[in-house]
């Protein structure tokens, strides 16, 4: 149907936008395609592709990752049920359940939210009737402030663990970073962590409106690196190894140093988005990355306050 409409580029872009896909396709169809029967075909195709947006891959024996729009989901299998790390958007609930069923006969028993953002906690309301949802206490408060559905019934302060089917999953709040309520989930038997959005494949978002901090982030990264792991699932992007995590930490420190030097040399806030660009710092080169798109004003303020 894409070829019939002659709007392949629009279509692919809209698939990436996920949530608005159906609406947009109808709009685009009205714009580019005139026949009513074609409209029916397009809507039908968009619905079927909406149900196949996600994919599942094995990370290690007993641990899978669900990818696709929204945060990466960790799927930890045990002999007594499944533990999920994050649960994407509300509309993903059914597809998450069917992908879990493709790797386990057992139900989801626990969902651990790495933080409150809706692309990581969106299916909480779907899971709450059948599973316990756990998050850091600040993440729950952020959800309440944002009027989000699906509040976790269980919160923790510094660390907690889930014991299920002979498996221990450890959950740590290691300090501020992406938000003030980030959890790092550690699978000690697999030497693997799920870092939520504390780890990002392209460039991170420092959510200053919800207690994010680049200074806190460096300390939190040091704490993550104190764990014994060789594999890491980032909130977005592909699987990382320990060296990737170390270089993420080092880039956080490097962009902080770079911003501090610019400010010492008289940088003002308006010039920060242009002046921060540095060809050695990939985050500042990612035009559409969340570091450049959403973090710079708060980052400028944070570093300015530090060097006053
Ligand atoms: Zn996030």
Image (cartoon, rainbow, N blue to C red):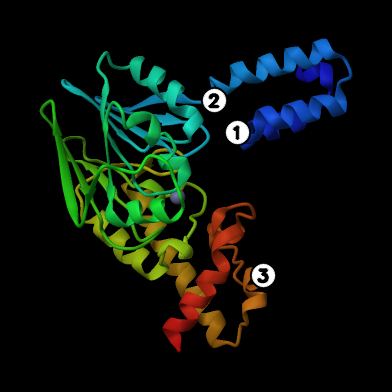
Residue occupying image coordinates x 63% and y 52%: 288
Question: Which residue carries the number 1 mark?
Answer: 18
Q: Are marks 1 and 2 in contact (CB under 8 Å)?
A: yes
Question: Which residue carries the number 2 mark?
Answer: 53
From the viewer's side, name the closer residue of 5 and 199.
5
Question: Which residue carries the number 3 mark?
Answer: 274
What secondary structure is found at the residue carrying circle 3? helix
What secondary structure is found at the residue carrying circle 1? helix
Occupied quadrant, residue 62: top left
First of labels 2, 3 by sequence position:
2
Drawn side of residue 268 relative to residue 256, left or right? right
Q: Are marks 2 and 3 in contact (CB under 8 Å)?
A: no
Residue furthest to the right in view is 34
How far apart are the two marked residues, 1 and 2, measured between alpha carbons? 8 Å
| The N terminus: image quadrant | top right
Above or below, 240 against 246 in this view is above
Residue occupying image coordinates x 45% and y 89%: 308
The percent coordinates of residue 49 (x first, y second) are 60, 20
Q: Is mark 1 within 8 Å of ligand 1?
A: no
The percent coordinates of residue 166 (x first, y second) are 10, 28
| Number of marks present in the image shown | 3
Drawn side of residue 223 relative to residue 266, left or right? left
The percent coordinates of residue 53 (x first, y second) are 54, 25
What secondary structure is found at the residue carrying circle 2? loop
Residue occupying image coordinates x 13% and y 25%: 165
Q: Are marks 3 and 1 in contact (CB under 8 Å)?
A: no
First of labels 1, 2 by sequence position:
1
């Amino acid at each position: 149907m894409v070829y019939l409409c002659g709007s392949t580029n629009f279509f692919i872009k809209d698939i990436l936008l996920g949530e608005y896909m159906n609406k947009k396709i109808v709009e685009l169809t009205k714009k580019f395609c005139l026949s009513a029967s074609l409209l029916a075909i397009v809507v039908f195709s968009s619905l079927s592709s909406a149900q196949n947006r996600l994919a599942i891959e094995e990370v290690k024996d007993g641990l899978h990752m669900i990818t696709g729009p929204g945060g990466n989901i960790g799927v930890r299998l045990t002999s007594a049920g499944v533990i999920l790390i994050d649960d994407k958007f509300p509309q993903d609930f059914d597809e998450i359940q069917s992908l879990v069923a493709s790797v386990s006969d057992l139900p989801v028993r626990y969902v651990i939210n790495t933080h409150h953002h809706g692309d990581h906690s969106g299916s909480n309301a779907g899971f709450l009737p059948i599973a316990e949802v756990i998050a850091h206490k600040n993440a729950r408060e952020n959800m309440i402030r944002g009027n989000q559905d699906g509040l976790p019934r269980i919160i923790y302060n510094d660390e907690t663990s889930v014991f299920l089917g002979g498996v221990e999953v450890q959950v740590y709040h290691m300090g501020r970073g992406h938000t003030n309520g980030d959890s790092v989930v550690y699978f000690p038997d697999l030497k693997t962590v799920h870092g939520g959005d504390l780890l990002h494949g392209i460039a991170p978002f420092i959510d200053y409106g919800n207690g994010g901090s680049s200074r806190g982030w460096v300390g939190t990264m040091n704490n993550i690196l104190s764990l014994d792991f060789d594999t890491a699932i980032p909130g977005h992007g592909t699987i990382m190894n320990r060296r990737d995590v170390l270089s993420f930490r080092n880039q956080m420190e490097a962009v902080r140093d770079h911003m501090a030097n610019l400010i010492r040399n008289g940088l003002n806030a308006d010039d920060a988005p242009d002046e921060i660009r540095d060809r050695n710092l990939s985050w500042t080169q990612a035009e559409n990355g969340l570091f450049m798109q959403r973090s710079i004003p708060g980052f400028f303020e944070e570093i300015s306050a530090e060097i006053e």
